[in-house]
Amino acid sequence: MSKSKKNGKILIIPKKVVTADAKNTILADQAIEIVDDIISSFVPIEEIQKQNYDEVYDVRNLTLIPGFIQTHVHLSQTLFRGLAEDLPLLDWLRLKIFPFENAHNEKSLRVTSQLSINELLLGGTTTFLDMGTLRYGEVVFEEMIDSGIRGFSGKCLIDRNDLYPDFKSTTREEINEIKNLAQSFHNSKSGRVRYSFSPRFVLSCSEMLLKETKEIMKDYPGSVYHTHSSESLQEIDEVRKRFHKENIEYFDSIGVLDDHTVLAHCVHTSANERKMLKERDVRIAHCPSANLKLGSGIAPIPQYLKEGISVTLGADGAPCNNNLSIFNEMRLASLIQKPIHGTEEIDAKTIFRMATIEGAKALHIQNEVGSIEVGKKADLVLMDLDSYSNSYSDSDESIYSNIVFSSTTENVKNVMVDGNWLVRVKQSLVYDQQELIAKGKEELKNLLKRL
Ligand code: GUN
Ligand code: FE
């Protein structure tokens, strides 16, 4: 289903608007007007003229928030949920994830992409940064284009692989293919779909590949460089053995760190590495549930924030989580720090911003999305914050904790991306749920036979 059609002029009348603007403004008694894909104005309720709109959506029981932004996910892995349990990172990759990803064909990659986009949208995530997989990269882009979601993806780059040697390509092939894919898909659909250059991690890439990729990226303004770093102790031990450096020191030594670099995890970093992260203005994608499930550790996020380092959130892959809910990540991102750093770390408002406007800033799309402001794209979520398990207070003070601590994907009712409704009253307008899940089961069965 193509989502290029625009919806004309829409008016949404919510209970409140949590804008995530610079002042954290929360509006009441204001409707929001959307023309095509853009938020065009706020309209005081008493001034509404319903006849001026193609659609008036009166939802005074629901709260409008910006669509969530996840800065690290793996669409290719969603099909493997529940099949890689209780393992540490390198064994998890070696024994399960690399063999599974290696067995993808076009059909299985298509259905895992659809399952992921479906889950992200139903959970209120409107933008993501995907790590991709080794082959069939175009399939993910086709699904992003067709579904209407916003995001970045790119071929994951692997030209050496001591963990699972079958799962790699040559440096030349990798370079050629990213040029083709970036050329074909970067900035598709007026920039809704963008390219991310995605070396898998330092242990899977030659220095030449890491460096050349960074050079190629410069030909694609608006793209990002996305990789994993400093996730588990065993991984960084391997990095030390190979390079006689810490992971981030190595990246810095080959010139791949800058403000368009997104590093997933950063659980274990030295003071010197943190200095580099700050100086180079690198963006960290924090994945608390994956870090717990793979036993990697607890990232020093309060320290990063104090040092002025950009921190945003992602669910990582479904087999290390085991779901793609931003609500899990928000809740854990706060709670896991409290026993270590004190109960004031990290407050719900800061977490909410990490999952919205800070995510947009990390990806350099803050002029388009991440907050509800006039002139921005209409990437919006309507939440029911008045369910039996939510706060019974209507105060603005409790709204952030109501979203971050008391809500789940269940509270997400409607989702709009680029001015198009993709979820309406909890129903996906993109996918037939039963059909999609059945297709997923079928393709997983076929994939497991290819192992
Ligand atoms: N490091 C390299 N690949 C991966 C991956 O797929 N998931 C996680 N969590 N870490 C990685
Ligand atoms: Fe990851």
Image: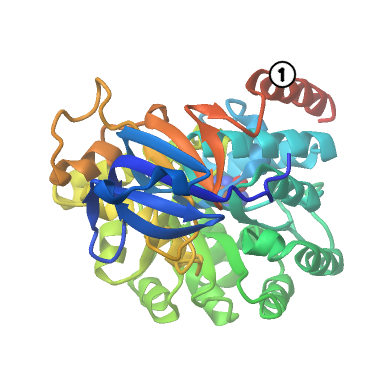
Q: Is mark 1 within 8 Å of ligand 1?
A: no
List x then y, in percent, for residue 315: 48, 43
Q: Residue at x 18, y 30 (%)?
A: 391
Quadrant (top left, top right, bottom left, bottom right) of the C terminus: top right
List x then y, in percent, for residue 330: 34, 44
Q: Say above or below: 384 vs 230.
A: above
Q: Quadrant of residue 203?
A: bottom right
Q: In the depicted view, which residue is nearer to us: 250 or 442?
A: 442
Does the rendering let one see residue 208?
A: yes
Q: Residue at x 51, y 72 (%)?
A: 245
List x then y, in percent, for residue 173: 86, 64
Q: Say above or below: 448 vs 290.
A: above
Q: Amino acid at mark 1?
A: Ala
Residue 97 vs residue 425: left or right? Answer: right
Residue 78 vs residue 28: left or right? Answer: right
Does the rendering let one see residue 87?
A: no
Q: In the depicted view, which residue is nearer to us: 37 or 133?
A: 37
User: Where is mark 1, residue-wise?
Assistant: 438
Q: Residue at x 29, y 39 (%)?
A: 403
